Image: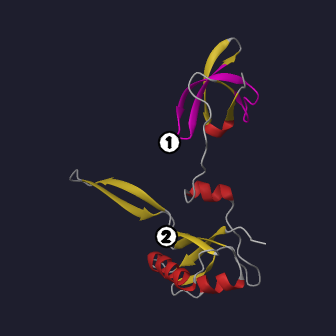
């Protein structure tokens, strides 16, 4: 009965995020807990700033200061491991007698902590069917694919006119020939 690990948000003292992450990683390593505490993440973003003198500076900053994300199988033991780390004030979404609320998959993807791997089995020029959205069940021809942006441009014939439509990669499927 292996329970799946979920992402939880822990609140830390401001400026302690890196220390908390390093301490949890050391504890996981020393106690051999890799199967129950699988990942620790501090969401970061790259910021480019242009100073008044025209100098460009690029640096990483925390997207959610004071918070660290932990992917773990929740239990009393894992709760105590994480909660016992100096600098941790608690789990987000936890009431006194209830376990904390894990993040949903959509929240995890939106934060950029985990990436969905989308396998594109169509190419430019293929006829595809739109799976969801306002144009669901329409068919069209793939004009361009931008995997990095999770976007596909499809030419759809509507009201006798060819219209380009921007969709996400997983919103279309190839029409079998």
Residue 128 % position (x, y): 68, 26
The secondary structure type at the circle numbered 2 is loop
Q: Residues within 10 Å of mark 1 (few under 14, many from 20)?
A: few
Q: Does residue 87 appear to the left or right of 158 in the view shown?
A: left
Q: What is the quadrant of residue 31 in the picture? A: bottom right
Which residue shows up at 65% across the image and 75% down it? 36
Q: Residues within 10 Å of mark 2 (few under 14, many from 20)?
A: some
Residue 56 % position (x, y): 27, 52
- Looking at the image, which is closer to me, 28 or 155? 28
Q: Residue furthest right?
A: 1
Residue 135 located within the stretch drawn in magenta: yes
Mark seen at residue 174: none
Residue 123 located within the stretch drawn in magenta: no
Mark seen at residue 148: 1
Nearer the observer, disc 2 or disc 1?
Answer: 1
Residue 124 % position (x, y): 56, 25
The secondary structure type at the circle numbered 1 is loop
Which residue shows up at 70% across the image and 75% down it? 100
Q: CA distance from mark 2 to mark 1?
A: 27 Å
Residue stretch in magenta? 129-156
Mark seen at residue 65: 2
Where is the C terminus found, in terms of image quarters? top right
Q: Is residue 121 above or below residue 116?
A: above
Q: Does residue 148 appear to the left or right of 133 in the view shown?
A: left
Q: Does residue 23 appear to the left or right of 6 in the view shown?
A: left
Q: Is residue 125 above or below residue 59?
A: above
The mark nearer the N terminus, 2 or 1, is 2
């Amino acid at each position: 009965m292996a329970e799946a690990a979920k992402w939880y948000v822990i609140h830390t003292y401001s400026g302690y995020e890196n220390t908390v992450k390093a301490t949890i990683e050391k504890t996981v390593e020393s106690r051999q807990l890799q199967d129950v505490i699988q990942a620790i993440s501090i969401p970061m973003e790259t910021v480019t700033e242009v100073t008044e003198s025209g100098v460009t500076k690029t640096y990483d900053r925390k997207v959610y200061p004071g918070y660290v994300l932990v992917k773990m199988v929740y239990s009393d033991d894992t709760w105590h491991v994480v909660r016992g780390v100096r600098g941790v004030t608690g789990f987000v979404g936890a009431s006194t007698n209830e376990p904390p609320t894990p993040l949903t998959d959509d929240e995890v993807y939106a934060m950029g902590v985990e990436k969905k791997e989308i396998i594109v089995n169509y190419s430019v020029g293929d006829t595809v069917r739109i799976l969801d959205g306002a144009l669901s069940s329409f068919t069209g021809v793939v004009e361009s694919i931008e995997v990095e942006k999770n976007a596909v441009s499809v030419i759809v014939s509507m009201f006798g006119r060819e219209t380009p439509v921007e969709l996400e990669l997983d919103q279309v499927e190839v029409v079998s020939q």
